[in-house]
Amino acid sequence: MIRTIALAAVLAAAPASAQEIHSHAADLGTVHFATSCSQAAQPHFAHAMALLHSFEFGPSRQAFTEAVDEDPGCAIALWGVALTYWGNPFATGIKPPAAIRAGKAAIDRAESIGAKTDRERAYIGAAAKLFDPAEPDQRARMIAYRDAMAAAAAKFADDPEAATFYALALASAASPNDKTYADQLKAGAILEKLWPQQPQHPGLAHYIIHAYDVPALAGRAVDAARRYGKIAPVAPHALHMPSHTFTRLGYWQESIDANIASGDVARRDGVVGEELHSMDYRTYAYLQTGQDAKARAMVEALPEVAGRFNPNGPASAAPNSAALFAIAAIPARYALERGAWTEAAGLESRATS
């Protein structure tokens, strides 16, 4: 509460067009994002941005909505709402039609209200590309968004958030067929340049890990992996994401530790998809280190956790596909990694949507 009051006092001294917001939750990191929204909306927007950069989509959406409730003219907050519906840009598969409709509705409302600055209009216009009904191909929409964010980052060269979102779009839209990893390397270079200026920014550490989340580049992400969970320790994904790097490099105990922490926070927050995702990574790491009894404990714990999974539950970094994958993968890993072929032959195949 003291931090929020102090934040409001600082903002009251600044003109609305120049207000720069900071995350007021120290355990989510620090984000700077200038907006034209009202003083009352600023703390909600700040909190939403810190959550968004750690892919905590459900809580982020709620905080962006609270910003709009405080200031109905805060169109840029509806940009944030739309991005929470797009969800994890690295998730495989086609985005659910309901999410696309909800995201487009948020963008339409933002455009109807009208942003007060060219910069905010550029963000909203770029996000609109993701929900363009005239373009049925999802990858084409991602590329259009990437290019629009490239233009925004070039036009507003003094805005590190524009560069950050451009780098994220560049990495997430990178072609899986390009084994030179040109776009991932370009994204990583942008983020690495920004990070020393904002060492507590959750998105910079997060997106560096994503940019280098392939075997050939994973070594470049070690510093980010070891720091990200400390930047945003209350975000389940911030605790889990470093294990992508640790798994690529065979840092098994660090992966185990990261996913125990992530699973504990996910369980506390009721984010079951993220809890299942962390269990999958733990199972794999236990098996790689010969800790078969601990891997077996994951298999035995799975029915209880899977029984709590609700595809319509809180939106998180781990999409439904990742949760369903974990439910199938955990017992499969346990059998296959041990060469237990009779057990493997007895695995049941279950259809999902």
Image (cartoon, rainbow, N blue to C red):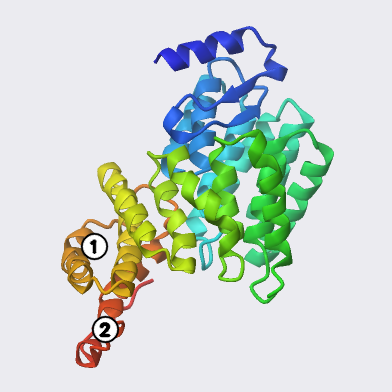
Residue at the disc numbered 2: 338
Q: Amino acid at mark 1?
A: Ala
Q: Does residue 105 appear in the picture of this structure? A: no
Dot 2: within a 10 Å radius of its alpha carbon, few (fewer than 14), some, or many (20 or more) residues? some
Q: Does residue 248 appear in the picture of this structure? A: yes
| Identity of the residue drawn at 17% across and 60% down | 304
Depth check: give the residue in front, 194 or 271.
194
Q: Is residue 21 left or right of residue 293?
A: right
Q: Amino acid at mark 2?
A: Arg
| Identity of the residue drawn at 53% across and 66% down | 94
Q: How many marks?
A: 2
Residue 110 placed where, x, y %?
A: 64, 35
Q: Is residue 274 left or right of residue 335?
A: right
Residue 87 placed where, x, y %?
A: 51, 52
| Identity of the residue drawn at 43% across and 68% down | 250
Residue at the disc numbered 1: 306
Comes first in the chain, label 2 or label 1: 1
Residue extending farthest to the right is 155
Given this view, does label 2 or label 1 mark the residue nearer the observer?
2
Image marks 2 and 1: residues in contact by CB distance under 8 Å: no
